[in-house]
């Protein structure tokens, strides 16, 4: 069985007539690469008419096209699904959470605050804390302080991604439970 793909002739004819009558439309749909001679205003569009007739195509009669501006309502805003975000922890007291670290595979990428990540980058990623917020982290009896400089982690059940330098100074690897507090 053979299927033949067809294009609606009426739609092609309407586009051809519209493009012939309106240089702006021809420009917007790519039939004319030169910009229209002047940018029309709504008032000039409403005042103008176009009585040009296109050449009949495939036995379809050409019709005169009158151009008038018809107000078009904006589509209603599309509701975005609510993203579940980890609530920002309260400052002060020590808390525990799961953390991971990101290493060499991320070197050269820019962080969410605009700096570039490399082996010496000192900071942590958190989904919502403001950039520059200082986090005191304790793991294996070692404590360090690092600023929030990136967004993440984007894996469920983790609160922080530690830079390679922070992880190394803590003796941290993989995914572990850490203690932290916001300074």
Image: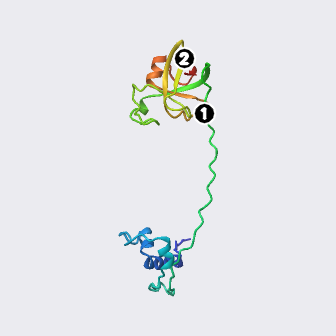
Mark 1: secondary structure = loop
Q: Residues within 10 Å of mark 1 (few under 14, many from 20)?
A: few
Residue 7: x, y in percent? 51, 74
Which quadrant: the N terminus? bottom right
Q: Looking at this rendering, what residue extends furthest in the top direction?
A: 141
Relative to 92, does residue 10 appear above or below in the rendering? Answer: below
Q: Is 152 on the left-hand or right-hand side of 32?
A: right
Query: How far is disc 2 from disc 1 in space, using C-alphas?
Result: 21 Å
Of residues 3 and 163, the one nearer the viewer is 163
Question: Which residue is at a point 47% across and 75% down the rendered structure image?
Answer: 44
Given residues 162 and 2, the one toward you in this image is: 162
Q: Earlier in the sequence, mark 2 or mark 1?
A: 2
Task: Estimate the x, y position of residue 21 in percent, counting from the top left.
Answer: 45, 79
Q: Residue at x 50, y 73 (%)?
A: 43
- Disc 2, SS: strand
Q: How is the image coloured?
A: rainbow
Do the CB atoms of the residues marked 2 and 1 lie less than 8 Å apart? no
Q: Which residue is mark 2?
A: 138
Which residue in the structure is indicated by mark 1? 156
| 58 lies above or below 45 | below
* Quarter assignment of residue 114: top left
């Amino acid at each position: 069985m053979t299927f033949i793909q067809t294009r609606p002739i009426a739609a092609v004819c309407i586009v051809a007539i519209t493009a012939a009558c309106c240089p702006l439309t021809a420009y917007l749909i790519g039939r004319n690469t030169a910009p229209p001679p002047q940018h029309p205003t709504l008032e000039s569009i409403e005042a103008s008419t176009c009585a040009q007739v296109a050449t009949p195509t495939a036995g379809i009669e050409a019709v005169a096209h009158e151009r008038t501006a018809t107000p078009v309502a904006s589509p209603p805003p599309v509701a975005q699904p609510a993203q579940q975000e980890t609530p920002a922890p309260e400052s002060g007291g020590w808390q525990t959470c799961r953390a991971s670290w990101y290493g060499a595979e991320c070197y050269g990428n820019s962080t969410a605050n605009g700096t570039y990540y490399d082996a010496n980058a000192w900071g942590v990623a958190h989904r919502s804390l403001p950039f520059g917020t200082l986090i005191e982290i304790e793991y294996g009896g070692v404590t360090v302080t690092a600023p929030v400089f990136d967004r993440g982690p984007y894996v469920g059940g983790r609160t922080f991604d530690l830079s390679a330098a922070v992880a190394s100074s803590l003796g941290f690897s993989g995914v572990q439970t850490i203690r932290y507090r916001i300074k």
